Each structure stands twice: as structure tokens, then as C-alpha cells.
Image (tube, grey):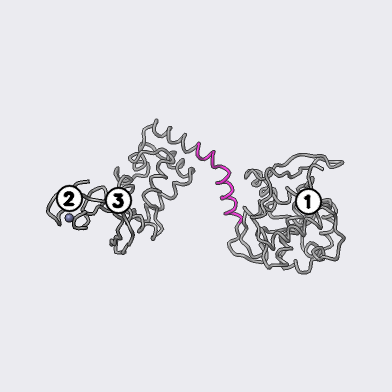
Amino acid sequence: MIRYCVNCDAERNLREERRRQSLVVKGDRIEFAAPVLVCEDCGETVAEPGYDDAVLQTAYDLYRERHGLLTSSKIVELRQRYAFSQRALCRLLGWGEVTIQRYEKGVIQDRAHDEVLRSLRDPRRVLELLDGDSDKLTPSERERYRERAQAILEQERSAWLLREVEGVLRYRVPDLYNGFRDFDLDRFIAVVLWFATYVERLSKTKLAKLLWLADFKNFRDHGVSITGATYARLPFGPMPDQFQLLLGLAVEAGAIMLVEESFGEYIGEVVQSLKSADDAAFEEGELAALEFVLTKFGQYSAKELSELSHKEDAWRNRAQGELISYDEAKGMRILDLSSLPNSSQQGRGHDKEE
Ligand SMILES: [Zn+2]
């Protein structure tokens, strides 16, 4: 490329080179490497609008990353997710017509605007804005954007639902009722899937007890639960708080399905896995706790497990519906290796279809 070099005061051949840059952005010194044009004769950098803009944009984005603000490409991505034009998005947010354009080109947004932009990740927020808008957009624009946001919401429905419920179920403070772990929906679903994979004809009530045993076994051995679930005393034994809801979420997440089956006199639901259990989701000690519970109790019926649980102080010393402290784990005879005969020869790798 031939350009005028100020230093040589002549037309010179230029080449591209990566050079260290150091710029001050809003009082912060930002250092980085970026491509620049260099005169082949004198070695000085030569200004060129395209290159200068790219250097500035890189510096602004590094500043944004350092301060936890959305980068310009993230802003573009967010806008394109809903197929908004720059101007339409400005009007919807009640901002100046060129605000978004400037942010996308590099101008750094303030924190208040950053938070507004971030909130748009949630399609429900976008729908709210579109519904609230009276004359900022034309009816046809509004309709088009609405359809798009609605389609995204449908697509991501499970993820939003799961995140929402998890947020509500978290205790925020690890204590003796969640086994010193914040409730973790992904882990809960992973354990449900694990038992659904390895236990035949797994009824919901049986699963509730296996979850309890696994969480309390892990707490007893390692001082922390696997899932962070909270358990309450119910008539047929301990059960995770919000168990029906949590199972519904495991279904929503595509991990399991609930199938009606007859258990002699009555019809009950059986938990079936829709994919393979993932051992990598667990630490070694957790896997050992799961194996222990599977080997020892995998073949017990829900009724047998219910009767066993009724002998435990963890269940007996509580009123109906009362939460069970993980502190009880150390006194649980059901978790002692020698106290019970193994229920089965069943272990991992046992073929469900046999
Ligand atoms: Zn030169």
C-alpha cells in the first residue's frame, strides 16, 4: 500500500505490523497489541482512518471488559438477537436516535445504560417494553419485533424457567438444612438422572428416598450435600422440598420423563431417563455416595424404604412437614455399612431391559 509518510515527507510503501499500544481511556491506561501501518523506509507508524478506528475500538472494549460493561460486539449481538435496527432500539428505549450506533462504534456507555442493555437478554423484558410502548414504534414494527421476541422466549423457555425457579429455591446461605450447599438445580437433575438410569422401575416416592439417602450419605462422609436440596418429614418418609416441582423441571430440562405404570392395586408414575447419566457431573466422593445408595437400596421397594426411614430419628423426631437437619446424618443407622443386608446384587451396568 502506498501512502504519504509525514516523517519522510514522501509517498512510501507501507506494511502492516502488530505494535504495542498504550492509550488512556477515561483515566485508565490500557495497553495492548494492535495492527498498525508502518512506513517501510523510516519505520514510523502512519495514520490511516480504518486502522485508527480499530485501535480505538480495541482500547474501548478492553476498558469495558475491565469495568464489566458490555463490549460493542456484545451490544451488536444483543440488538441483532431481536433483529432491531439501531434506531428502532433507541426509540424503544427512549434514547437519542444515534445512541446505539455510537455504542456499537465504540463510545463507552455509562453504567445505567449498560444495565438497561443487559436486561434485554431476557426476551420477557423486551416483550414488556414492546407492550408498554404506545407510539415509539409503528404498529407493524412493534408486531414484527414482538413475534421475534416471542419466538426466542419459546425457544429458551426451559432455560428461563429453570433459572427462575432455581433463583427462588436458593437459600443463599449454606446451612444445616441444605447441607452447606446452595441449592443447585443442575446437580439435582443430574442425581435424578443418575438414579433413573440405574434403577429399574423407579417410582417417584422411591426416588425421593434415594435422593435423601445420597445427599445425607455425602454429608456424613464429606460434610456437604450433593444437591443442596432441603428435605422435610412427610408421612411416607423424607422428601425433597418442592419435589413435584423439581421433577417437573427435570422433565422440562429433557433429562427424564414420567410414565404411568401399575403397582398392583394402584397406578403410579415411574421416572425414566431420557439420556445417560453423566458421572463427570460429580466428584469422586459424590459418586461413591451414589454407588453406595444404589448398591444398598436400589432393589428396595418404596414401601420398604419408607418403613426403614421411619426407624430413623431423623424422621421420628420431627413433626409432619418439618425440615430435617443434615446434622442427623451422623446418627442414621440406615447409612451404616453393616446394619442392613445389601438389598441386591444390582450395581452399575445392570441392564435395565433384562
Ligand atoms: Zn517514512
**Quarter of the rendered image showing ligand 1:** bottom left
Closer to the camera in the image, 18 or 119 = 18
Closer to the camera in the image, 179 or 295 = 295
**Label 1 crowd (10 A; few <14 / some 14-19 / many >=20):** many
Which residue is rendered at x = 19% and y = 46% of the image? Answer: 2
Label for residue 12?
2
Residue 88 appears in which quarter of the rendering? Answer: top left
| Camera-side mark, 1 or 3 | 3
Dot 1 or dot 3: first in sequence order is 3
**Disc 3 designates what residue?**
54
**Label 3 crowd (10 A; few <14 / some 14-19 / many >=20):** some
Q: Which residues are magenta?
A: 151-169
Which residue is rendered at x = 31% and y = 51% of the image? Answer: 106
**Disc 1 designates what residue?**
206
Position of 314 with respect to 284 (left or right) is right
Q: Are marks 3 and 2 in contact (CB under 8 Å)?
A: no
Amino acid under disc 2:
Arg
Q: How many marks?
A: 3
Tell me the CA gap for discs 3 and 2. Answer: 22 Å
Closer to the camera in the image, 209 or 284 = 284
Dot 2 or dot 1: first in sequence order is 2
